[in-house]
Image (spheres, rainbow, N blue to C red):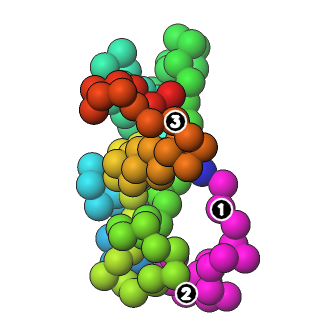
Amino acid sequence: MPIDYKKYPANWKDVIRPDILRREQFHCKHCGIEHKARGYRDVARNFVKCDENLEIWAKRSGKRVFTIILTIAHLDQDIKNNDYSNLAALCQKCHLHHDRPFNEVKRRRRKEIQGFTPKNKDQEYT
């Protein structure tokens, strides 16, 4: 999720983001995963946290080991609303899940502006 820091307050990186991470005790507010945890996803797409030995095994087994980096979500989708009650520390998976309904609405609006309207409510916007 690329971020354009020019759209954020000057103190986003050094004050606001750290404050929210501390408030959430460096865990995702939705799933509880720890910031900077190392691990991989199992066949059910669940995150498996690794210690050093499990990470070595996972890599040798062909698993893609990665680091969880928590992001700060604007719960109301307004990046100008930086009230702390509107901000939450989320892992990327939960952040994407939170944003999905908002993104679907934006996508529908964009398609309607471009002239595509579904014949019925069940027709897919693609």
Residue 51 shows in the view: no
Which label lies toward us, 2 or 3? 3
Q: Is residue 5 left or right of residue 59?
A: right
Q: Residue at x 60, y 43 (%)?
A: 114
Find the magenta span and give its range.
Answer: 2-18
- From the top left corner, tell me how far across and down residue 96 is, in percent: 43, 47
- Residue type of the residue flagged with mark 2: Val
- From the top left corner, tell me how far across and down residue 111 is, in percent: 53, 42
| Marking on residue 116 | 3
Question: Dot 1: what SS?
Answer: loop
- Residue type of the residue flagged with mark 1: Ile
Residue found at the far top of this picture = 61
Which of the 4 image quarters holds residue 27?
Answer: bottom left
Queried whether the magenta region covers residue 50, the answer comes back as no
* Residue highlighted by disc 1: 3
* Residue highlighted by disc 2: 15
- Residue type of the residue flagged with mark 3: Phe
- From the top left corner, tell me how far across and down residue 24 is, in percent: 32, 70
Q: Is residue 115 left or right of residue 81?
A: right
For the residue carrying disc 3, how many other residues have a C-alpha within 10 Å: few (<14), some (14-19), or many (20+)?
few
Queried whether the magenta region covers residue 15, the answer comes back as yes
First along the sequence among labels 2 and 3 = 2
Which label lies toward us, 2 or 1? 1
Contact check, label 2 and label 3, Cβ < 8 Å? no
Q: Is residue 49 left or right of residue 111?
A: left
C-alpha gap between disc 2 and disc 3: 43 Å
- From the top left corner, tell me how far across and down residue 99 is, in percent: 40, 52
For the residue carrying disc 1, how many other residues have a C-alpha within 10 Å: few (<14), some (14-19), or many (20+)?
few
First along the sequence among labels 3 and 1 = 1
